[in-house]
């Protein structure tokens, strides 16, 4: 799971170009001049609060309640929930959501060892979609592949996470983004594979499934893009690359942060959502035709139970229990008992 792999950036500059195009695109409604100072003041106002309070108050100030957006050449002013945006706070990801981890360098290995407890990501904020955006047929597919589509219980098909730290360095928040971002990309790749749009072993950069993350401290915010690359041997690497750091002390940076975050949320609730709807339709059609692909059998790894972020049953466990004995569970379940448990890690 390389972080800032310079060779990968050189091989595939189109990934950062793609991210920067979404991040920096023009918006129809210009952010008011005074908003820059208001955003900085909001961060400073809650700088002495706990992490949850600062994160909620600061990011609430960044996301405008309504915005002008262009769909098929028609402009309209709408609220975010009209386009299906949903947020989850401190929600544990599904068990077994982190892909198999291979490191190519000592620096990445050190980063992962620094945070050995992050077996199940639990971002401060996860942005995704609400159920109302999908037809009954699509929701059947979402539930059938709950571990992928519902990787973050309480919303569907997440596309951006936020990790915040009130104490310590921004690097600590960035390190937390590594596994969470990789988990989202991995889940999206499995669904794309099921739709027939992606061959998991096709070499090169996967531009169908990138996602974003934001690492935050009260004085600065770092934006990352997460994506997957398959090498010539068929091995999948999950990359994270820095896109931009917003230094809130500098003039205009708060305004730019709001602009860029709203662009990412627009992408997630408009063009990406349309792509997901098309993908779910293809998966449904494949089931009806009897041509649905089978997800590859995951590798089994032993994980120390104490290093899990939590042991409460998620909605995925409830769903899996309800489907026990049918052919719809797949290989995603985890056997329990004893100090160690076997978990499935998708290769």
Image: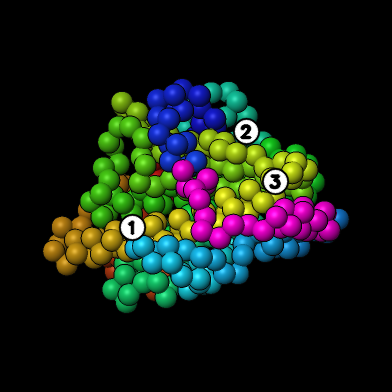
Q: Where residue 303 appears, x then y in whole percent?
A: 54, 45
* Residue assigned mark 1: 275
Residue at point 36%, 40% (across, down): 206
Q: Find out whether residue 44 is within the magenta segment.
A: yes
Work out whether residue 328 or residue 106 is closer to the camera in this orientation and state it. Answer: 106
Choose top left, top right, bottom left or bottom right for residue 278. bottom left
Q: Earlier in the sequence, mark 3 or mark 2?
A: 2
* Residue assigned mark 3: 252
Separation of marks 1 and 2 at Cα, in angstroms:
33 Å
Separation of marks 3 and 2 at Cα, in angstroms:
32 Å
Q: Which residues are magenta?
A: 21-47
Q: Which mark is residue 79?
A: none
* Residue assigned mark 2: 111
Residue at point 40%, 72% (across, down): 133
- In the image, is 2 to the left or to the right of 197? right
Q: Nearer the viewer, mark 3 or mark 2?
A: 3
Q: Where residue 149 appears, x then y in whole percent?
A: 40, 61
Residue found at the very far left of the displayed protein: 289
Q: Nearer the viewer, mark 1 or mark 2?
A: 1
Q: Find out whether residue 233 is within the magenta segment.
A: no
Separation of marks 3 and 1 at Cα, in angstroms:
33 Å
Work out whether residue 27 or residue 236 is closer to the camera in this orientation and state it. Answer: 27
Work out whether residue 280 or residue 335 is closer to the camera in this orientation and state it. Answer: 280
Screen quadrant of the C terminus: top left
């Amino acid at each position: 799971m390389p972080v800032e792999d310079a060779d990968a950036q050189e091989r595939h500059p189109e990934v950062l170009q793609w991210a920067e195009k979404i991040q920096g695109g023009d918006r129809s409604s210009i952010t008011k001049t005074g908003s820059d100072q208001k955003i900085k003041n909001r961060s400073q106002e809650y700088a002495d609060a706990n992490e949850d309070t600062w994160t909620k108050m600061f990011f609430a100030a960044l996301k405008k309640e309504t915005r002008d957006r262009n769909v098929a050449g028609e402009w309209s002013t709408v609220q975010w929930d009209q386009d299906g945006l949903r947020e989850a706070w401190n929600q544990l990801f599904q068990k077994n959501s982190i892909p198999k981890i291979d490191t190519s360098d000592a620096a990445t290995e050190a980063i992962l060892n620094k945070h050995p407890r992050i077996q199940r990501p639990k971002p401060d904020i996860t942005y995704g979609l609400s159920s109302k955006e999908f037809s009954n047929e699509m929701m059947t597919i979402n539930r059938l592949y709950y571990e992928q589509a519902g990787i973050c219980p309480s919303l569907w098909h997440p596309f951006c996470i936020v990790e915040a730290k009130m104490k310590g360095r921004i690097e600590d928040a960035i390190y937390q983004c590594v596994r969470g971002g990789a988990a989202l990309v991995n889940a999206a790749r499995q669904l794309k594979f099921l739709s027939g749009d992606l061959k998991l072993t096709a070499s090169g950069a996967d531009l169908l499934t990138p996602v974003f993350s934001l690492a935050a401290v009260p004085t600065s915010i770092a934006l990352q893009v997460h994506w997957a690359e398959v090498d010539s041997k068929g091995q999948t690497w999950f990359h994270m690359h820095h896109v931009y750091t917003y230094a809130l002390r500098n003039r205009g940076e708060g305004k730019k942060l709001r602009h860029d975050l709203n662009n990412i949320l627009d992408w997630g609730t408009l063009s990406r959502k349309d792509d997901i709807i098309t993908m779910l339709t293809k998966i449904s059609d494949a089931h009806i035709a009897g041509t649905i692909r089978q997800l590859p059998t995951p590798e089994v790894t032993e994980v120390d139970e104490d290093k899990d972020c939590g042991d409460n049953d998620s909605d995925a466990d409830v769903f899996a229990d309800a489907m026990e004995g049918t052919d719809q569970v797949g290989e995603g379940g985890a056997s329990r008992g004893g100090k160690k448990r076997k978990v499935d890690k998708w290769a």
